Amino acid sequence: MDTGVNIKENIAAVRARIAAAAQRAGRNPEDITLVAVSKTVEPQRIIEAIDGGITHLGENRVQELVKKYDAIPGRIQWHLIGHLQTNKVKYIIDKVSLVHSVDSIELAKEIDRRANRRGTVVNILIQVNVAGEETKFGISPDQVEDMIEEIRSYPGIKVKGLMTIAPFAENPEEIRYVFRELNKKYIDIKRKNIDNIDMEYLSMGMSNDFEVAIEEGSNMVRIGTAIFGKNR
Ligand SMILES: *Cc1c(COP(=O)(O)O)cnc(C)c1O
């Protein structure tokens, strides 16, 4: 299907905007990981994105990730960015580089259990619902330290940082505070140098708000629409 979307041009444009935002914030554009969100996108078009230099792909559904994992060749790092049910952990445990959406101790326990069984360690981010939206998953900012304290001793997981999905806003300036708040938490925890906690990634920013997110400290953006178009 010709959707009239030029994926490679879009990637170049997104990269340029990432670089400009990083520079405004006095940061190195190379320190920002671009995760192309390929949910609902056909493998053929995903391969076009890979030809355009994409090495990180994000999916929000377990089944779709597993299918594409098998269908798409190359050295891709897969990110699970959507809500993960405990009964589906077993399907992705050996496939993902990073699970962005750990939002309960129960889920962390199940990932740990499955990882131990396979003799592996799974990298995770804790999903935080900064704005307290009822429709979104994630723990509240003031629960983050307690959760970290509980799960840091689990041998099968490695906490690598924090993730948030900001509320949608026509004007992303309105949600700048969300990114700022999570960055503050991220830096706080990083400074504490907690054993087995490696605050390496702050995953925030989507097509509509990634520049503001980068200005506020994001080093991992998850971008779908700006790469693959609206009707993917
Ligand atoms: C779909 C999705 C994205 C990408 O959103 P776009 O607005 O299409 O860039 C990012 N993060 C999560 C968790 C998503 O589900």
Image (tube, rainbow, N blue to C red):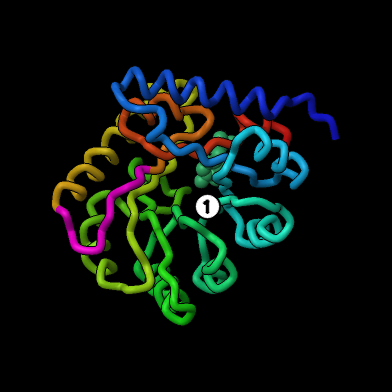
> Residue 9: image x %, image y %?
66, 23
Instruction: From the viewer's perspective, tell me whether residue 231 is left or right of residue 120.
Output: right
The span shown in magenta is 193-202
Image location of residue 125, percent across then percent down:
38, 54
Say which amino acid is labelled 1.
His
Q: Is residue 113 visible?
A: yes
Question: In terms of secondary structure, what is the magenta stretch mainly?
Answer: strand
> Most extreme residue toward the left, as rendered?
192
Q: Is residue 94 above or below residue 18?
A: below
Residue 208, compared with residue 23, is above or below; it is below
CA neighbours of label 1 inside 10 A, class few (<14), some (14 to 19), many (20+)? many
Residue at position x 28%, y 33% in the image: 180
Residue 62 relative to residue 149: left or right = right
* Image quarter in which the N terminus is found: top right
Location of residue 140 in the rendering, given as x and y in whole percent from the top left corner: 30, 51
Quarter of the view holding residue 12: top right
Task: Tell me which residue sits at (52%, 66%) in the image.
Answer: 85
Pointer 1: what residue?
A: 79
Looking at the image, which is closer to me, 157 or 74? 74
Give the residue at x 26% y 66%: 152
Front residue of this view, candidates 196 and 41: 196
> Between 172 and 133, which is closer to the camera in this rendering?
172
Q: Position of residue 84 (x, y in %)?
A: 51, 62
**Quarter of the image containing the C terminus?**
top right
On the question of residue 166 being in view, the answer is no
